[in-house]
């Protein structure tokens, strides 16, 4: 791993040596991460800065720099504290499908609480022990299914993609309601004028309207992904 990531690795994974003498430190990495999370939850990731986190903690910016060298490392700490560690399984000794369903629903709840984490978790980066504990749990839940290690990791990535997509849509919809209902209403207006060009879509929208605009995209997508995994696992174990 390149030197550019060395400081992030140290902050996320340790060790964090304590001073042998002198006054007790007024800050620690968890307090700093939580201050950043509070700002991001209320105002978004773009409003997080070293200056604002220092002010929230009642210290100078220079004092904060003694613990965290910059915003990139601060955001890495925030992400790991906000996402992890993965909570214990809700259903002990459940089958792989129940475990993965619980896991995905718990992850969705995390991203809904901290939707700013969507933009902070894009691309190759150093992940901390909290975030990696989620991947560990998913890969472990699929142990013994006949899937290869690579396929088990891909299954987790596929479910994370569904979680992210649904969270992104909900975030864009804001407080005005569920995104599926909003999109349906916009499309229905368009079809009133242009429906003859899109007969299949017009028919589908009429059917969807009978569900009272209920947000079904999450559950539908989750179950279809799990169905696909089940088909592959059955193939392997036959």
Image (cartoon, rainbow, N blue to C red):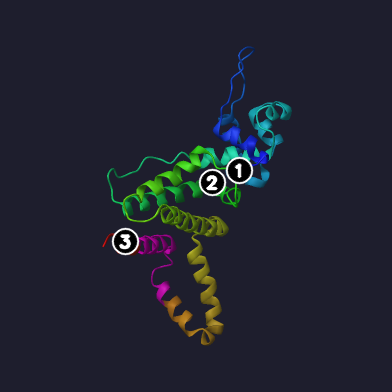
Q: Marks 1/3: CA distance?
A: 44 Å
Residue 146, percent from left and from top: 33, 56
Query: Callout 2: 10 Å neighbours few (<14), some, many (20+)?
Result: many
Secondary structure found at label 3? helix
Task: In the rendered view, tell whether residue 75 sits above or below residue 21.
Answer: below
Q: Marks 2/1: CA distance?
A: 8 Å
Residue under circle 3? 236
Question: Which residue is nearer to you in this view: 197 or 136?
Answer: 136
Quadrant location of the C terminus in the rendered image: bottom left
Q: Earlier in the sequence, mark 2 or mark 1?
A: 1
Residue under circle 2? 114
* Image point (28%, 59%), residue name: 237
Query: Callout 1: 10 Å neighbours few (<14), some, many (20+)?
Result: many
Magenta stretch: includes residue 214: yes
- Seen as rendered, the residue at the extreme right is 62
Residue 176, percent from left and from top: 54, 59
**Magenta-colored segment: predominant secondary structure:** helix
* Image point (43%, 44%), residue name: 136
Q: Are marks 2 and 1 in contact (CB under 8 Å)?
A: yes
Residue under circle 1? 40
* Image point (68%, 40%), residue name: 4
* Image point (31%, 64%), residue name: 235
Q: Is residue 187 left or right of residue 235?
A: right
Secondary structure found at label 1? helix
Residue 199, percent from left and from top: 48, 85
Q: Magenta stretch?
A: 207-230
Between label 3 and label 2, give the one nearer the viewer: 3
Q: Are marks 3 and 2 in contact (CB under 8 Å)?
A: no
Question: Which residue is nearer to you in this view: 140 or 197?
Answer: 140
Question: Which residue is nearer to you in this view: 38 or 166?
Answer: 166
């Amino acid at each position: 791993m390149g030197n550019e990531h060395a400081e992030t690795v140290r902050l996320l994974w340790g060790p964090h040596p304590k001073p042998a003498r002198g006054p007790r430190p007024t800050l620690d990495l968890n307090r700093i991460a939580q201050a950043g999370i509070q700002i991001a939850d209320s105002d978004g990731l773009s409003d997080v800065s070293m200056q604002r986190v220092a002010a929230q903690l009642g210290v100078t910016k220079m004092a904060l720099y003694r613990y965290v060298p910059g915003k990139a490392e601060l955001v890495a700490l925030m992400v790991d504290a906000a996402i992890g560690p993965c909570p214990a399984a809700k259903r002990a000794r459940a089958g792989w499908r129940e475990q993965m369903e619980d896991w995905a629903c718990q992850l969705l709840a995390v991203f809904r609480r901290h939707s700013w984490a969507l933009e902070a978790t894009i691309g190759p980066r150093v992940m901390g022990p909290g975030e990696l504990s989620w991947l560990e749990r998913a890969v472990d839940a699929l142990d013994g299914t006949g899937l290869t290690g690579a396929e088990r990791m891909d299954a987790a990535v596929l479910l994370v993609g569904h979680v992210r997509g649904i969270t992104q849509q909900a975030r864009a919809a804001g407080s005005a309601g569920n995104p599926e209902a909003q999109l349906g209403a916009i499309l229905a207006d368009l079809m009133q004028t242009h429906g003859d060009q899109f007969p299949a879509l017009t028919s589908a929208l009429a059917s969807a309207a009978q569900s009272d605009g209920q947000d079904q995209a999450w559950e539908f997508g989750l179950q279809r992904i799990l169905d696909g995994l089940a088909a592959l696992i059955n193939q392997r174990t036959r």
